Amino acid sequence: NLILAIETSCDETAASVIRNGNEILSNVVASQIESQKRFGGVVPEIASRHHVEQITIVIEEALEKANIAPSELDAVAVTEGPGLVGALLIGINAAKAFAFAHGLPIIGVHHIAGHIYASALVEPMQFPLLALVVSGGHTELVYMKEHGSFEVIGETRDDAAGEAYDKVARVLNLPYPGGPHIDRMAHEAEKGVDFPRAWLEDSYDFSFSGLKSAVINYKHNMEQRGQEIFPEEIAKGFQDSVVEVLTTKTVKAAKEYGVKQVIVAGGVSANRGLRESLSKALAQEGIPFTAPPLHLCTDNAAMIGACAAYMYEAGVRGDLAMNGMPGKELKSWV
Ligand code: ATP
Ligand code: FE
Ligand code: MG
């Protein structure tokens, strides 16, 4: 099948043409990072305005680069949620207009399912599978026994991993988004500050707000005592804590559920420390591990198209009454 996919859930305006859920014919992403940087985060109204300006250009560019005419497509896919409602609606309305104009079915995709299906663009998914989803708004362990089947076995009880990265980056006066900066600094430090790990007993849940407070308190105390602060050591201490907890829980779940593959998904999976740690720990257990290339980890439409390809084959269809669902839950389609 041949699918045009659109993604506007947050601050990237993206469109892509995907063949059979695994071949990227085009993958266009217009990022707003430069303009959102000034505000130290994503301002919803500004995000919506950017999407309005970019969406038509991005869709046309995706079709042009793929060298595909609308008549050749089988469906239009679009992120239905979760995300910023105003941002989602720009993509959804563009998708509806396109679907109506060209007589195509429309498929509403869950953003996190999309992040997970980025791995299908790298190699075929092997079931049962465990996905560690770590992004700006989510931190979840998702068990999949087959295509379209999602069971959330653990999730964050407070901040998402990416959110913690961005908040700690702010404390260290680093620009938005902070994840990549902390990652780089952590690799420059020889030793890290000793911060706590939130294990939450035997559960597969996560918590990062205590760690964030520990970083703030540490910096504050050092300042009060007039001691010199080494931001690289804070970055490394913070990253070591996040990575150790994420890795330990992922490996434990992978063994308990007897999965054939572990994949990592979402913006934080671009993190070098996390990729190295997961690949090492899973190799020791002999469990295959897939980490998509960085441009498929952060928000993009190719992942939405990959997910939609399987939904299309399973007969899932939306209609023109589709609405933005800011709090959409990850539900199975099988
Ligand atoms: P969600 O997918 O939950 O709706 P989102 O789409 O905003 O949220 P993504 O775009 O998937 O999130 O990821 C963005 C997050 O990834 C930001 O918090 C950013 O700091 C983080 N990030 C990006 N690169 C890295 C990195 N190298 N290390 C750590 N975090 C990173
Ligand atoms: Fe995302
Ligand atoms: Mg984003």
Image (cartoon, rainbow, N blue to C red):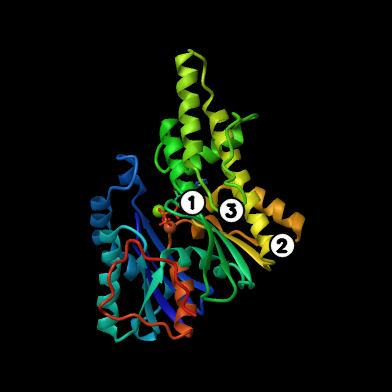
Q: Secondary structure at mark 3?
A: loop
Indicate which disc, 3 or 1, sits on the residue closer to the N terminus: 1
| Front: mark 3 or 2 | 3
Q: Where is residue 94? Give x, y as percent.
A: 27, 71
Q: Secondary structure at mark 2?
A: loop
Residue at 70% from the left image edge and 56% from the top image edge = 282
**View quadrant of ligand 2:** bottom left
Residue reaching furthest to the front: 201
Please give the residue where the numbered disc 1 appears in the rendered image. 156
Indicate which disc, 2 or 1, sits on the residue closer to the N terminus: 1
| Front: mark 3 or 1 | 3
Residue type of the residue flagged with mark 3:
Ser
Residue 273 shown left or right of residue 223 in the figure = right
Please give the residue where the numbered disc 2 appears in the rendered image. 287
| Front: mark 2 or 1 | 1
Residue 300 shown left or right of residue 124 in the figure = left
Q: Is residue 75 visible?
A: yes
